Amino acid sequence: MGKGVKAAVVGGVFAVMVGGAGYGVYNIVSAVNGDGGSGASTAETKKSGPPDEDEVRRTSEAFFAAWEKGQAAEAASYTDNAQKADALLTGYADEARIGEVGITPGTATGTTVPFTVKGTVTYDGKSEPLSYRSELTVVRGQTTGRALVDWEPSVVHPDLKDGDTLVTEESSAPPIEAVDRDGTVLTKEDHPSLGPILDTLREKYGAKAGGTPGVELVIRHAEGTTGELADTPLLTLAKGKPGTLRTTLSAAVQSAAEKAVRRFAESSVVAVKPSTGEVLAVANHRADGFNAAFQGQVAPGSTMKIITAAMLIDNGVTSMNGPAPCPPTATWQSQTFKNLTDMPPNESATLANSFLRSCNTAFIKLVDEQPLTDASLTQEAEERFGLGRGDWKTGIASFDGSVPASGGPDRAANAIGQGQVQMNPLNMASVTATAITGAFRQPYLVSPELDGRQLRQAGGLRAGTAAQLKQMMRLTATQGTGRDAMAGLGGDIGAKTGSAEVDGKATSDSWFTGFRDDVAAAAMAQQGGHGGDAAGPIVAAVLRAGG
């Protein structure tokens, strides 16, 4: 169906060019100049400044009237990108099969006009009413000075983004009824941030879950940098029979995760079961729907010190009770590193003390010790923690971290989760799970038995290394930088905080990872400050629910 959609869009544009005499040609030529196109004479006096109230009303009314009549080219001529507008509006009727369109404008606010669209979607003798709200903004054309609709795909439907199309057809995958580990049904209404994930699970496993397809109006997403997104259903004309898809999620932990991330903008969290690798919760609070919890690629800050500490112990550089002095500054190949401004130096500190206080300089000083090389941190991450080879098979798209072998200042920066290191909450929850159990168990959301996936294997940690890491995380949660966030949690608890400096941001990203008994969780919040400020409360809330 995807090829058919593209053909219809191209065909729609071609029809405009060859039909309607010189009118369609003018539209497209004008679109190149960012002025849409219309039959208006270019001899009119060119205006400047924002469109006035009358221009906003006349332009929007003309656009709505043409759209209602299914006159895609005419409606497109009142926009500042006639070519793209015509393609999407042509597909609105031909591919989405939406007719009997009625548009009711609301009260304009300045140059922005809200409106309600009502129509009927018809396919193979089946019809259903459609209703939704959107808005448009009227701007001044740069070349002609005409008042034009500022073209965005969201004008046609608020959920459309550039390159998306609307399509009505028999579903490409049967519907699913996704259930949690205990059989509780998981819905978008109860767990909003699961929406894109449930769509992806349907697309990937619908046929294997035993259901039959129905007929739907969907958004077919453009292919992006993270791969092709699953269709987003908007309206069901004929219900299919859903198949049951069991996931590893816990409805209770997922609900806590959803609530926790809503407290902080651009935040994400993942919880896993360390003894199995099963994902218990994944939640994101983002406007773009991107699953940053699984697919994010950002610096994890000092949470990375879990892996760095493991490297130091495994290579005999130091141990939990061995020396790790914490001076005010540390210089590595001409780059000077500092600690938090309120951290007093401690030249006699142990690794455990520098870890629980999250002393940067202690770790910077130690990465120069023999037998460490530029590749030592990479080897620890890949061989012990299962990171960085691009082969995790969680059941949906995911990124498994990147810890490149780095020379120069980045070797030191990588050790404290800056430089070239990239992670996401899924990765750091897995790191914590490996640290406290000693075994790497690749996280997964859907059982590999369903489709025969081979999960990533890695060596894990020596028993002595894991025991020291777990104890240092316990100390961090009870005496160190994680104490405030983890206060009140019972059971066996541990934590590691982090803050990551990101170019161009006024404040650091907040990172936090922790465990409570057999639940490990990690979170990040963009521009959240220190680890305990934003990400810490998110993780604590999830661990509390998972206990």
Image: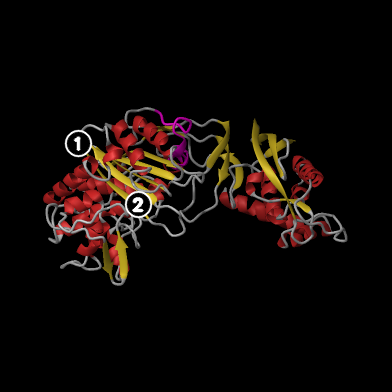
Q: Is residue 194 left or right of residue 129?
A: left
Q: Is residue 329 left or right of residue 258?
A: left
Q: Which one is in front, 2 or 163?
A: 163
Q: Is residue 494 visible?
A: no
Judging by the rendered image, the residue that carries numbered circle 1 is 492
How packed is label 1: few (under 14 Cα within 10 Å), some, or many (20 or more)?
few
Q: Please, what secondary structure does the residue beneath circle 2 have?
A: strand
The label number, if any, that marks residue 499 in the structure image: 2
Q: Which one is in front, 321 or 229?
A: 321
Q: Earlier in the sequence, mark 1 or mark 2?
A: 1
Badge 1 vs badge 2, beta-carbon distance below 8 Å: no
Of the two numbered discs 1 and 2 in the rendering, the one whose residue sits closer to the viewer: 2
Give how far apart the Cα atoms at labels 1 and 2 are.
Answer: 24 Å
Residue 268 image point, x, y percent: 40, 44
Q: Is residue 64 visible?
A: yes
Q: Residue visible at 75% across and 57% down? A: 141
Name the amino acid, label 1. Answer: Asp
Q: Is residue 444 left or right of residue 71?
A: left
Residue 187 image point, x, y percent: 45, 31
Name the amino acid, label 2. Answer: Ser
Where 146 sits versus 124, above or below? below
Q: Residue visible at 23% across and 31% down? A: 490
The label number, if any, that marks residue 121 in the structure image: none
How packed is label 2: few (under 14 Cα within 10 Å), some, or many (20 or more)?
many
Q: Is residue 352 left or right of residue 393?
A: left
Q: Which residues are magenta?
A: 185-202
- Which quadrant of the structure image shows residue 491? top left
Q: Please, what secondary structure does the residue beneath circle 1 have?
A: loop
The scheme the figure's colours follow is secondary structure
Magenta region, mostly helix, strand or loop?
A: helix
